[in-house]
Image: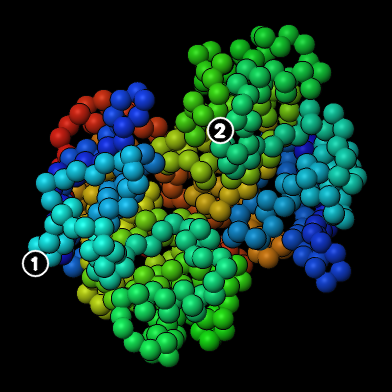
Amino acid sequence: MTALEIKDLNVWFGHAHDRVDAVKSAGLNVMQGESFGLVGESGSGKSTILRAITGLAPHWSGTIRVEGEPLYGAKRDRGFFRTVQMVFQDPYASLHPRHTVDQVLSETIRLHGLDNIDKRVTDLLNDVGLGQRFRFRYPHQLSGGQRQRVAIARALAGEPDILLLDEPTSALDVSVQAEVLNLLTDLRSQRGLTYLMVSHDLPVIAHMCEQLAVMRSGEIVEVMSSETLRLGKPNHEYSKQLLNASVAPHQ
Amino acid sequence: MNLLDIEDLWVRFPTRQGVFDAVRGVSFSLGRERLGIVGESGSGKSMTGRAILRLIRKPGIVEANHINLEGRDLLQLTEREMRSVRGKQISMVMQDPKFSLNPVVTVGEQLMEAYLQHNSGSKSRAKKMAIEMLEDVSIRDPERVMRAYPHEVSGGMGQRIMIAMMLIPNPNILIADEPTSALDVSVQRQVLNIMDGLVKERGMGLIFISHDLNLVSEFCDRVLIMYSGRIVEVCEADKLHQAQHPYTQGLLNSLPRLDDKRLHLSVLTRDPSWSDAPSVRG
């Protein structure tokens, strides 16, 4: 089954002569349980695709289907957020500085209309490998990796099927990145999640995803399997450039 | 002869919970070479770079037996004398051009200021130098860029302008603190190549501070690996992948690789003895 279907997607900001076309007729299909990567330089429109799906980029045209259901405009209902959740790049900016971990998670659970909040918070913290001693801490009392685990727990609170991951580890040290990526790998297999992951780091995408799309100035120039990337055999000239730029010669 | 010689450098911050030691007794020397300093956030690598230029703000404390720049101890200089060292003898490129260029002054004026601060000369001479310098960092159409404001140039161009600005007074030592972390991979390499070329051509010493092991092993001659304020290992950059210290090996292994497919990445397990071991001389 197709978890996420995007056809002929255009996203723009501003209007008339100020109009910027951030995404131009992009199309991709993500099957259920699959992990799909979006790579490209900054400004190539990869994050904008995620924002259009979640309704954070209100001006778009084309088709977005989530588990077969088409989306319209920028309004998303409660059912959508029980299906699709997003993890943002910067764990320092995406958590409320004056809410404890407990407040962040229980508020999210309550908004999803779920009961048994106390048990759910306990379970979520265990699932993301934080444990109960972090429950009443504030974000400034956590490290970057721990904050990103809280952000992942918050995304999982509504038991979604699809996670949109916007550079989830690019603000973290490599050793912490490894821990968070391992967590995401485990959560996907335990919960049968579908990932759409944005990153500028090709080895990270190859590690996490089965398929990936390469974007440049708003367009998808190539869709390939991670295997093709690992073998160093992309077709498009730009994908080759990107690959050469990110692999050190002696590797 | 060594350009820079540092002996037993400490950077301390008094806090309500007692004194926090960000850098703990680091010693190293720099010749006409490219020296990399790598480590995770909080390892003290940036603090080391800033301490050399005495840019640690109060209440931070910098202590060392000496920080000798061509035989002169920087710690003994007055603040006024220090100002002639900064820029003229040692300059520093910071991480993000967005925050290090003045947003309300044109690129040209900032470049000319950098020249006129340390050289007596006419404005027209400064302008000529600035344009030459922009050409050196491969900026096409330097005349136009001179008139531009920082927000009108891209990140990669901004960082090249920063490098140009730092090299205009012709310093002997360049400290580059994560100079390309805010840039895209494709631009990263271009900026590094330019910096590398200029440093080689002028026979400067470069201190390259980064968290990116692969980048450092590619662009430096020698690498210091820092962990919790100390140097845990020193190695030749091209032999970084044969590093001995478990911390360095752990960092290298935690990176995903295109040529090695695995389900889980290996995770670094930290040994308390790493931070207790005395600092290695670099």
> Which amino acid is tagged 2?
Gln
The answer to whether residue B244 shows anywhere in this view is no
Q: Residue at x 47, y 31 (%)?
A: A143
The x, y position of residue A244, in whole percent, is 47, 64
The x, y position of residue A21, in whole percent, is 78, 64
> Which amino acid is tagged 1?
Met
Q: How many marks?
A: 2
The answer to whether residue B78 shows anywhere in this view is yes
Dot 1: chain letter: B
Image quarter (top left, top right, bottom left or bottom right) of the N terminus of chain B: bottom left
| Residue A236 in the figure: left or right of residue B40 | right
Q: Residue at x 69, y 23 (%)?
A: A157
| Residue B17 in the figure: left or right of residue A145 | left
The x, y position of residue B110, in whole percent, is 46, 74
- Viewer-nearest of labels 2 and 1? 1
Q: Are marks 2 and 1 in contact (CB under 8 Å)?
A: no
Q: Residue at x 66, y 9 (%)?
A: A119
Q: Residues within 10 Å of mark 1 (few under 14, many from 20)?
A: few
| Residue A132 in the figure: left or right of residue B200 | right
Q: Residue at x 55, y 28 (%)?
A: A139
Dot 2: chain letter: A
Tell me the residue that label 1 is attached to: B1
- Mark 2 lies on a secondary structure that is helix
Label number found at residue A148? 2
